[in-house]
Amino acid sequence: MNVRTRGVAVWGSAVVLAAGLAVLVGCAANVGTGGTAEQQGSKQPVKTTGGWRMARMTFKVGSGSKVSITGGGEGTSNCTKDETVTSFTTKSSEEAHDFGFYAKTDGACDILEKSYSYFNVVVKESNDSTVGSARVYFGQGPVGSVTYNISCSAETGRITCERDREGVTISRK
């Protein structure tokens, strides 16, 4: 599933090779409210594949459940920083929380390597007994793309994790 990131307009990114040839590594995309650079009157490529990338987790786990979302860490992310790390107690039977990271564009990032992160989600009862856990992948499509993909799997317990139009939904079984 493709997840559209918010507030970014991209025409494409060009990489100049040693021989002076330009190679397009991005594509025209309208992923925000501003339109593409061409629609805004500019004909110049704009490199904006870096920056904040956010998606949404909807929790249908009941009021009073303790939830933790942990992104990043060694071996779980690439070309990212400031991944979401948060804990909260649900206040209703269904509520949504945004999560994500800052996609880097320095060094090999965005030219040779994709940005992605795995997020571990744990749902507990109010007495701290574990209901279940899930693993959510959120990452860039092709290198240089502004399209991000999301997938998830319930790892243990009595929860399910499914993709939806905004991101993922984590529910009690």
Image: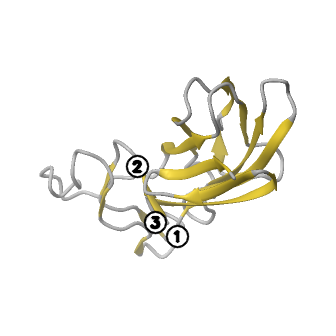
Q: Nearer the viewer, residue 30 or 64?
A: 64
In the displayed structure, does residue 74 sit left or right of residue 92?
Answer: right
Q: Is residue 51 above or below residue 140?
A: above
Q: Amino acid at mark 3?
A: Val
Image mark for residue 15: 3
Where residue 150 appears, as percent x and y from the top left, is 57, 59
Give whichever of discs 3 and 2 has the lower sequence position.
Answer: 3
In the displayed structure, does residue 57 sit left or right of residue 36?
Answer: right
Image mark for residue 97: none
Secondary structure, mark 1, is loop
Where residue 22 appears, as percent x and y from the top left, is 40, 72
Q: CA separation, marks 3 and 2?
A: 13 Å
Q: Is residue 64 visible?
A: yes
Residue 58 image-quadrant placement:
top right
Q: Amino acid at mark 2?
A: Thr
Secondary structure, mark 2, is loop
Where residue 168 appears, as percent x and y from the top left, is 56, 52
Q: Amino acid at mark 1?
A: Pro
Q: Is residue 40 above or below residue 86?
A: below
Nearer mark to the viewer, of 3 and 2:
2
Image mark for residue 48: 2
In the displayed structure, does residue 35 sit left or right of residue 91?
Answer: left
Q: CA separation, marks 1 and 2?
A: 15 Å
Q: Which residue is mark 1?
A: 142
Q: Residue at image x 52%, y 66%? A: 141
Local packing at callout 2 (Cα closer than 10 Å; few below 14, some 14-19, many 20+) is: some
